[in-house]
Structures are given as C-alpha cells and as structure tokens.
C-alpha cells in the first residue's frame, strides 16, 4: 500500500475536496498546489500520476491531527523523513483519537480480527522485542473501517 493509496482512501472516507486538502497541508506550514493534490490522487497507471513523498505524507497526517484534535502549544511537529505503515497507523490513531478498543472495533467492522496484544505491538518502538511491522492488509482493513464509519452510505 503506497502513500498515495492512503491519501486517496482518507480523502474519500472523510469526503475532503481539493481545497480542503490544500488547507490541511497549510496547517503544517506546507504549501501545495491544486495540481500537486490532483497528481497525488491519480492512480498509478493513469497519466499525470506523481508519488507523494514520505515527508509530504507525514505533513498531511500531521495536518489531519491538527484539524481533528486542535493545534498544540509550541512548534508544529516536524514531518518524518521516512514513513512506514506503523507510523501512518499511529498518526491516524492520534488524529481520530482512537483507543485500542476503538481500533479493534473498526477492524471488526471491516471483518478483520486482531487481538489486543497484536495491535499493541504495532505501536511499540522498532527496537522493542515485541514490536511488529504493520503490513498492507492490516492498514487496508483499518482504512476500510474508517470509511465504513465516516461514509457508511457510500460503501
């Protein structure tokens, strides 16, 4: 699952238009154009496709956190230079203010079962002995659960 896939899924699930996408980036002091947003949302096989970088995707997720949870005092968080599914998953957990039970309910809604211990392994430090890498399937089902929650009529 690419950053572009995650971006497309979130855009659809939250019913965000191009201007709102630009505004979410602006919350982290990142200026993007409407054309950049369009190019990121195009499917890989279509002309005009541009891959969104890890830094830009992290900036969008940070902006989503600010949009949904409010801005914290102090400096705007710096975007990660390298993203993986675990970081994306953690940022979405923060943005949607989800507890473990909420995430498990979202996964169950998309017909995917996961135990609490398995879930907590995704949010551990990478050097922790019980850390587990989040694979495409888990992130895809989680995003599907978000979609089923926020756009239940359009599934």
Image (spheres, rainbow, N blue to C red):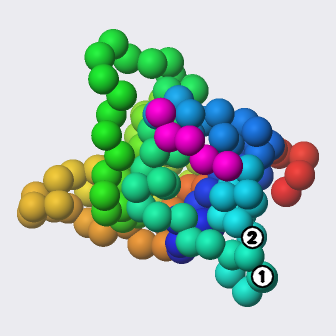
> Is residue 10 shown above or below 16?
below
Q: From the image, state whether disc 2 or disc 1 is nearer to you.
A: 1
Does any portion of residue 62 appear in the rendered image?
yes
The answer to which image quadrant residue 4 occupies is: bottom right
Q: Is mark 2 in CB contact (under 8 Å) with mark 1? A: yes
Residue 153 percent location from the top left of the image: 90, 46
* Residue range corresponding to the magenta coloring: 29-33
Specify whether residue 32 is painted magenta. yes
Give the labeled residue for mark 1. Answer: 47
Which badge, 2 or 1, comes first in the chain's sequence?
A: 2
> Residue at left 62%, top 57%?
7
Query: Could you tell me which quadrant the N terminus lies in?
Result: bottom right
> Is residue 75 shown above or below 58?
above
The disc at residue 39 is none
Task: Answer left or right for 130 relative to 98.
Answer: left
Give the labeled residue for mark 2. Answer: 42
Query: Could you tell me which quadrant the C terminus lies in?
Result: bottom right
């Amino acid at each position: 699952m690419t950053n572009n896939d995650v971006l497309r899924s979130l855009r659809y699930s939250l019913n965000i238009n191009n201007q709102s996408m630009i505004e979410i980036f602006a919350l982290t002091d990142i200026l993007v154009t409407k054309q950049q947003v369009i190019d990121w949302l195009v499917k890989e096989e279509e002309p005009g496709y541009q891959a969104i970088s890890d830094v830009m995707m992290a900036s969008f997720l940070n902006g989503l956190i600010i949009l949904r949870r409010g801005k914290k005092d102090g400096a705007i968080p710096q975007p990660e230079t390298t993203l993986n599914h675990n970081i994306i998953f953690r940022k979405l957990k923060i943005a949607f203010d989800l507890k473990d039970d909420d995430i498990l309910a979202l996964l169950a809604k998309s017909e995917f079962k996961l135990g609490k211990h398995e879930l907590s392994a995704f949010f551990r430090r990478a050097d922790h002995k019980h850390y587990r890498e989040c694979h495409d399937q888990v992130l895809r089902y989680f995003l599907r659960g978000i979609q089923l929650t926020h756009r239940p009529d359009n599934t």
